[in-house]
Image (cartoon, rainbow, N blue to C red):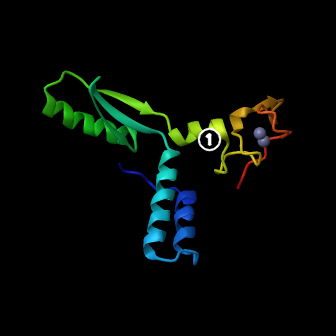
Amino acid sequence: MRITPRRDEIKRIAEILESDSYESADKMAAAVLKEAAKILSMRDTYAVVLSKHASFGPFGSKKEAEKAGKVLLGASGEHGVGLARLASPGRLEAQLEGSDWPGYCRCRHSKELHLMNGSARGRCGMYCGCEQYRERK
Ligand SMILES: [Zn+2]
Ligand SMILES: [Zn+2]
């Protein structure tokens, strides 16, 4: 899976690498892997669907999936492949449980859960007492 790291993602990993709170390189490496998995779980990905029994993915972009699809098509003898967008499991979890991720309100709920009030983002729809969307930085 090919990805282009984003500034906030790089910052999350750099914070681990610059931290003094890990006893060993192994523990730091484990923390880096867990954080990288969390970062990737917040992204939508793509799959190449050859048949209902054979799908391949995730791919980091639609373009990457299309490229792999063409290779698979040539090798498989199938007449066509489909592409599926895989909605991010991290975002789904964040929608249900709240998140401290950038782009979420200080109340931990997403922008979409804050009901529109004129042109400003209004009260949170989760009855958490939040009166207005204020984005986390
Ligand atoms: Zn809120
Ligand atoms: Zn809320």
> Circle 1 sits in a helix, a strand or a loop, which is it?
helix
Q: Residue at x 36, y 42 (%)?
A: 59
The picture quadrant where one finds residue 113 is top right
Q: Which residue is mark 1?
A: 94
Q: Residue at x 39, y 29 (%)?
A: 84
**Residue type, label 1:** Ala
Residue 132 is left or right of residue 104, and the answer is right
48 relative to 8, above or below: above
Q: How many marks?
A: 1
Mark 1 crowdedness (10 Å alpha carbons): few <14, some 14-19, many ≥20 = some
Question: 6 or 25: nearer the eye?
Answer: 25
Ligand 1 quarter of the rendering:
top right
Q: Residue at x 20, y 34 (%)?
A: 72
The picture quadrant where one finds residue 63 is top left
Residue 123 is left or right of residue 17, and the answer is right
Question: 65 or 119: nearer the eye?
Answer: 65
Question: Where residue 121 sits in the image (x, y, percent)?
Answer: 79, 36
Q: Residue at x 55, y 75 (%)?
A: 18
Residue 136 is left or right of residue 73, and the answer is right
Name the image quarter holding the C terminus: bottom right
Ligand 2 neighbours mark 1 (CB distance < 8 Å): no
Question: Where residue 85 sits in the image (x, y, percent)?
Answer: 43, 32
